[in-house]
Amino acid sequence: MWTMRSPAGSDVLIIGGGLIGLAAAWRTAVRGLSVTICDPAPGSNASFAAAGMLTPVTELHYGEETLLSLNLASAKRYPSFIEELREASDGLDPGYREAGTLVVAFDADDREVLSELHVFQQSLGLKAEWLTGREARRLEPMLAPGVRGGLLVSGDHQVDNRMLLAALFAALERDPKVTIVRSKVAELTVTGDRATGVVLEDGTALPAAQVVLSAGCWSGQIAGIPEELLPPVRPIKGQILRLAIPDVFKPFLSRTVRYVVRNNHAYLVPRAHGELVLGATVEEQDYDTAVTAGGVYELLRDARELVPGITELPLIETRAALRPGTPDNAPLIGPTALPGLLYATGHYRHGVLLTPATADGVAEILATGTVPEALAPFSPRRFEHHQK
Ligand code: GLY
């Protein structure tokens, strides 16, 4: 095994305990390295708020074909990743559900948007079935009578991100090579020409042979990282709601339903245990995390157009969290120009989906020094010398 041992401290220190940092820690420890994760509130923010859609085909965007390849690879890895995690967490259920995804349109213009998406999907050889409104309603009887048609993607699934977090915590707790430090990193330590650890807010120095930055939208704010290497991540606010599905309405929806209403895109993700996640706004509001009346109103208004029965459900949670956006909407994964410093950040709208591919890739780099081919396009070095 290729590894540079730290004289005292961990082989690897991970800044940030979201899904990416926790999963990278798990996979790295599986490779035999000791890992310390630093985060004042691990498992919170976007990782906790997310809907957990694993929908590379229905969330396809023009110009993002390279990202699609990684998204598909990560979706494919999910079942085995979940099984390994179930075993590592002593039998916890990480909440993975293969139920497929339906995307529906509200009016004729929205149907045109879906039709174009379908053509694009087909041009890339992706599997998606065009449905009439009637066919869509047959699959999901709660859909409004006026629904204009849809796309059924049987291969797009979901995971309950909160159950996934719980399973990851359990797996990490059981591994003596892993330490979670519930503190904020104040500064990266650079000795000579390499990253050699971090200093916490209380002044504690934690040395490490290699440091991974996975602090989501705060990744660009760590002192000590040379200015020209700071990752260009920015916060993209998402407001998201959770509703309860009383027994009398179950199953309410049988699969994830994404929809386009007057060119607004949103989604409903039904959990097996009777929760319905309704998301999400996409807002450039700096680091603001207020839940606004307007945000909640728009989400409910659009959902009601396609699934009128939603107004009957108890609203049990409103939340806003910050996604880490990047200039090209793709993550930054891999070594930086500073030896000993890696990035695993900037996953924007695909953090949950990309958790397995990122975690495996980071563990491979940390353990062997080799960047997997699939991660090469996502090198952080593509943004070196950017102007923040
Ligand atoms: N991937 C879902 C979202 O970012 O809202």
Image: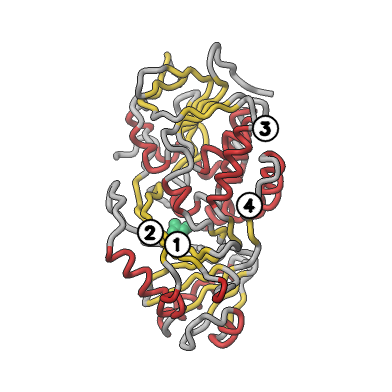
Q: Secondary structure at mark 1?
A: strand
The C terminus lies in which quarter of the figure? top left
Identify the residue at horizontal 57%, vertical 37% (top origin). 24
Residue where numbered disc 3 is placed:
30
Residue where numbered disc 2 is placed:
318
Q: Give whichever of discs 2 and 3 has the lower sequence position.
A: 3
**Do tag 1 and tag 2 residues touch (Cβ < 8 Å)?**
yes
Q: Give whichever of discs 4 and 1 has the lower sequence position.
A: 4
Q: Give whichever of discs 2 and 4 has the lower sequence position.
A: 4
Whole-angstrom CA distance, mark 1 to mark 2, is 7 Å
**Do tag 4 and tag 1 residues touch (Cβ < 8 Å)?**
no
Nearer mark to the viewer, of 4 and 1: 1
Identity, as a three-letter code, of the amino acid under mark 4: Ala
Does residue 330 appear in the picture of this structure?
Answer: no
Whole-angstrom CA distance, mark 2 to mark 4, is 32 Å
Residue where numbered disc 1 is placed:
242
Q: Give whichever of discs 3 and 4 has the lower sequence position.
A: 3
Identify the residue at horizontal 41%, vertical 66% (top origin). 315
Residue 111 vs 65, above or below: the answer is: below
**Do tag 2 and tag 4 residues touch (Cβ < 8 Å)?**
no
- Pick the front one: 315 or 222: 315
Label at residue 73:
4
Nearer mark to the viewer, of 3 and 1: 1
Identity, as a three-letter code, of the amino acid under mark 2: Thr
Q: Tell me where residue 362 appears, x and y as whole percent.
A: 57, 36
